[in-house]
Image (tube, rainbow, N blue to C red):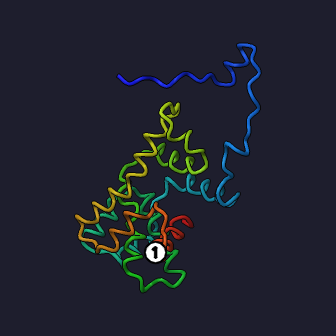
């Protein structure tokens, strides 16, 4: 058995013991919300639309750019993921990227590895963008965020494996595998990430 980390009393325990807890330094401990209020509104919209499936235009885009096992892989996603992925591809098409076939296929299938991922895990994945790393990754994480985050982050690798089995091009597999990592100098990956974040 491993040793347990030392107990660190929380603020309520300190007060009950008659000890004044140190003031919270919110500037140091918490990161500002990325992107400001429009990001929050976008996330609220995502939660509201989570129960919606793809519409006719979404399915039309999928049928135009996918065939065979890749189309079956798209159809095997949760309806909310089909909708999101098709909207990601449509965002790219609306901006003139109709000739980037690998980019559009990756947009349609970048979340194929999510499967029936729990809603709780999806929420944790988004919320942890705003939390300090020690709170998320700490051994004594009270909210079990570490496990939920690990399950959520693993979808990129699972999706890439599914794409290998379905016969996708090496570039589509690479874009899917890396779509949550820093893009570096990969302009196509950066564009996929912009489209993903916008939808």
Q: Quadrant of residue 62?
A: bottom left
Q: Is residue 166 left or right of residue 181?
A: left
Which residue is depicted at the point 49% across and 53% down?
Answer: 51
**Which residue matches tag 1?**
186
User: Nearest the camera: 114 or 156?
Assistant: 156
Direction from residue 33 to residue 199 in the image, left or right: left
How many numbered tags mark residues here?
Answer: 1
Is residue 30 shown above or below 170? above
Where 34 falls versus 131 (above or below)? below
Give the camera-side residue of 32 and 103: 32
Q: Position of residue 79 (x, y in %)?
A: 41, 58
The image position of residue 32, as x and y in percent, is 69, 52
On the question of residue 57 being in view, the answer is: no
Q: Foreground residue, 129 or 78? A: 129
| Location of the N terminus (image quadrant) | top left
Name the residue at 54% across, 64% down.
197
- Classify the position of the C terminus by image quarter: bottom right
Q: Which element is circle 1 on?
A: loop
Q: Does residue 35 appear in the picture of this structure?
A: yes
Residue at point 45% right, 72% down? 189
Report x, y in % for residue 122: 48, 49
Q: State the residue at coordinates (40%, 60%).
A: 111
**Dot 1 surroundings within 10 Å: few (below 14), some, or many (20 or more)?**
few
Q: Give the percent coordinates (x, y) of residue 83.
A: 46, 63
């Amino acid at each position: 058995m491993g040793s347990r980390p030392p107990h660190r009393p929380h603020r309520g325990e300190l007060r009950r013991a008659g000890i004044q807890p140190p003031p919270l330094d919110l500037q140091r401990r918490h990161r500002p919300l990325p992107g400001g209020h429009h990001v929050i509104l976008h996330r609220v919209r995502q939660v509201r639309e989570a129960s919606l499936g793809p519409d006719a235009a979404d399915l039309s885009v999928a049928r135009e750019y996918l065939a065979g096992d890749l189309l079956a892989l798209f159809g095997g996603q949760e309806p909310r993921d089909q909708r999101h992925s098709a909207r990601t591809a449509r965002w790219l098409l609306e901006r003139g990227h109709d000739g980037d076939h690998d980019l559009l296929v990756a947009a349609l299938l970048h979340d194929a590895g999510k499967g029936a991922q729990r809603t709780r895990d999806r929420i944790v994945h988004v919320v942890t963008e705003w939390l300090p790393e020690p709170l998320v990754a700490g051994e004594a994480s009270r909210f079990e965020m570490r496990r939920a985050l690990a399950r959520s982050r693993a979808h990129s690798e699972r999706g890439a494996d599914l794409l290998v089995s379905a016969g996708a091009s090496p570039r589509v597999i690479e874009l899917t595998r890396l779509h949550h990592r820093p893009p570096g100098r990969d302009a196509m990956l950066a564009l996929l990430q912009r489209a993903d974040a916008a939808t």
